[in-house]
Amino acid sequence: MLKVSNAKGEDVLTKENYIIVTQPELDYCAASARGDAGIRGILNVQIGTINNTTASNSYTYYNTLQTVVERNGSYPISVTTKAIGFDVGADGKGTKVAVWVDWNHDGDFRDTNEKVLVMNRNGSENFNGVINVPADAKRRKTRMRIRSFYSFGPGDEEACGEAAEGEVEDYNLYINATDINPIADFKANTQSVPSGSFVNFEDTSQNNVTGWEWSVEGGTPSISYDRNPQIKYTTPGTYTVTLKVSNTAGSDSKVRANYITVTQGDVVSTCNDGIQNGDETGIDCGGSCGPCDPTCDDGIKRG
């Protein structure tokens, strides 16, 4: 809140939800594949709302791909790799896919329960398993790491460092999260109005939005921090509307160009007694001429 004053008086401006504090990204250990990342590279990952098909790279963090999971929940995961691999034999050697999740959000994958899956190749490049979310998983966004690689024996799965072959991909999980990035969207009760009319805007954004900033071209007010503002348009034209939303995870904007069309409103007649007085308007403001009006010679007043 800002309060200002001068010799004429004072004024106060309050901006609700004006400052957003976001969660910083943790610095996780580096991971990569040495040489040809195409050998045993990851082609597709599916879990929850994530369904990501990619080319093979040594390492990629897909920071915009996310899915929500619940404590004590179980979530199937499917990983498809390139068709260059060997089944895992009795000695533990062969192509594997391992998955880690930083359940306590401390910036590493070293805790006891954070290597959540090791899936062995068994006649197919489709690796399937289930991730079980622990009851004490920290409620927030956290990192999931997936690694395809050639294993030289049991227990050699490593979340960090460089492997001779394969690929590493990182994704975000939101555990019972309220801090998932917002997705801005809105609608209006009408998109065409005569001048002098009001338009009611409705926020339809997703993911626990806590702040709203509307930029309304041609409207009054032109800036609003209400969730669902009512805006008046007085001048004919076509106008753009922008909504920026935010929460603790970040912000997002939705722009609808040329969204509201304002037409010329009806001219309201102010002459209602049959006699034009001054600048009154109307289709027929005629009436009886006054006896002292020298320009009226037919008994009907015009102009």
Image (cartoon, rainbow, N blue to C red):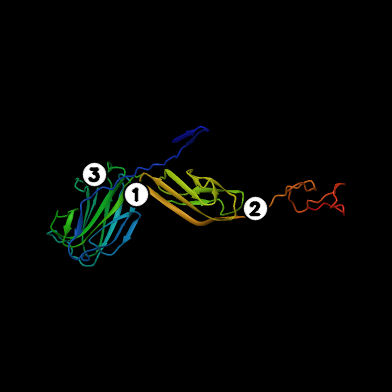
Q: Which residue is mark 2?
A: 265
Residue 39: x and y in percent read 20, 66
Please report whichever mark, 3 or 1, sits nearer to the chain's N-terminal start. 1
What mark, if any, has residue 106 been given in the picture? 3
Question: Distance from label 3 to label 2 (Cα)?
Answer: 61 Å
Question: Residue 157: image x %, image y %?
Answer: 17, 54
Q: Residues under labels 3 and 1: Cα distance?
A: 19 Å
Asked where in the image residue 210 lies, by quadrant, the reply is top left
Q: Amino acid at mark 1?
A: Val
Looking at the figure, which quarter contains the N terminus?
Answer: top left
User: What is the quadrant of residue 43 in the picture?
Assistant: bottom left
Query: In the rendered image of this protein, does residue 69 appear above or below residue 120?
Result: above
Residue 196 left/right relative to 103? right
Across and down, in percent, residue 198 comes to 58, 48
**Callout 3 secondary element:** loop
**What's the residue type where badge 2 is placed?**
Gly
Quarter residue 21 falls in:
top left
Residue type for callout 3: Asp
Q: Secondary structure at mark 1?
A: strand
Q: Which residue is mark 1?
A: 68
Q: In the displayed structure, does residue 14 sit left or right of residue 294?
A: left
On screen, residue 5 above or below 116: above
